[in-house]
Image (spheres, helix red, strand yellow):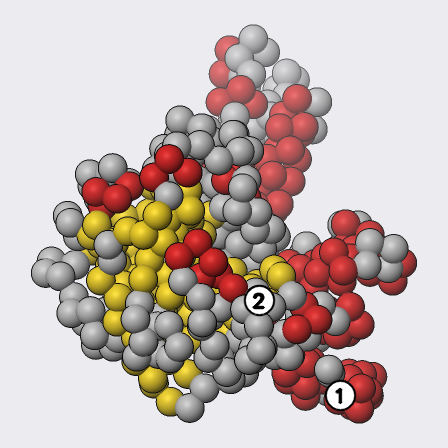
Amino acid sequence: MVDQNSLKAAVQAIKAGDRQTGGRILTRILKQDPQNELAWLWFSQCQTDPAKKRYCLSKALSINPNNRVAQQELKKLDIPARGKWLEQLSGIQRGILLIGLILVLSLLCVGGAILYGRIPLPSSPATVLPSDTPTATLPQMPVTQMPETQIPSTQTPEQTLTPTSPATLALTDTPVVTLTVPPTESLTPTVAATFTPSTTPTMAYGRPGPLASASHFASPPTIDGTWVEWPKNEMPVPYLVFGEAEWSGPKDLSASYKVGWDAQRLYVAVKVRDDHYIQNTNGKFLYKGDSMELLLDRDLKGDFDQKVLSSDDYRIGISPGNGAINGSREAYLWNPKDKAGNVFARITAMTDAPGTYRLEFALAWSIFDITPVKGAVYGFGFSVSDNDDFHQNVQQSVISTLQHRQVADPTTWGTLILK
């Protein structure tokens, strides 16, 4: 349960103009309670990036679609900010824009003047012609008349003044200033509680869920429960998808994981925080104790829009140990149903610290009838189940990489790519 005093303190800090302090408090609140509508609403006030503000408001609306404040704030974001575009330009961009405008205006003035004859034609210096009447003292000088052909009326010098070199400085030479709008679809929030997965994949046949990447191993890792041989591509298991009433926070259940592969096997390494480890089941009921679940759609392209499980959709459960972390471990295949049963897996689990354990397991590609290649893409999901009831075997809560997890609907799964 979130301390209401903390929420009040965050609101007071934001109202006082201290958005940084308010944001830190709200981050802690949302880590404990990702479904806190008011926290998301106030957290939007801490954001200066319109895309992040939109994300926070959208989270508040997803919790309560009737939240009028969130609706109104989103409408404000949808209204373009008039006159703000110039403020967003850098000094260099403003200078380029100003030069471009000056050039355009100059060309328009010159062109208009030429078109309407406002620029006078060049003329010869005025010639003073001698008088036709001779004087008494001076002999009559022959009249030298300047032939009119020296300033022919048929030749229009203004045509020779048509600016040719300035034309090359027209708008085509003026850099175009582009105003970049921050993306809204690939936002990564700063709230630690949401552990936002990687951006929606853009490769062919990628599902709309999160993207997980599997690192390639040149030589097989040792399945010993440690992460020594693994690259630093740790991914979160961020969504509470079942048992909200039973989940008391990250110390109760939270996890992160890594995925790797080579020509023979698919490897998964998991770190789990769980205040009570309870696993007293096995076989098809192992999900009623502390366990993991791996989902893999082998033929993503072939049945991309199919909302029911088929023979190429695999669902495998992993038990870290029956009775205790060092107990007997197993992997159970629930789907495809015609192959249901225990499958061979190399599994090792170890206690990392009080309330925390690590696990590694390896599954042969032959289980999935897959010959792996670099760049291959599969449907994918990973979840962790928790039971804190010492008296009965029951699945109390589930966290997952899939925000809208439906194990029987592969279109809600994410994507795995072999790097």
x and y percentages locating residue 221 in the rendered image? 16, 66
Q: Position of residue 160 (x, y in %)?
A: 49, 22
The percent coordinates of residue 93 (x first, y second) are: 54, 56
Between marks 1 and 2, how big is the CA–CA gap?
A: 29 Å
Q: Residue furthest left?
A: 219
Element carrying mark 2:
loop
Rendered image: mark on residue 394? 2
State the image quarter where residue 128 is shown. Answer: top right
Residue closer to the observer: 159 or 410: 410
The kind of residue tagged 1 is Asp
Q: Residues within 10 Å of mark 2 (few under 14, many from 20)?
A: many
Q: Residues within 10 Å of mark 1 (few under 14, many from 20)?
A: few
Which comes before the other along the chain, label 1 or label 2?
1
Task: Identify the residue under disc 1.
Answer: 3
Q: Is residue 31 left or right of residue 418?
A: right
Q: Tell me: 88 left or right of 210.
A: right
Question: Are the residues tagged 1 and 2 within 8 Å (C-beta)?
Answer: no
Give the quarter of the figure containing the N terminus: bottom right
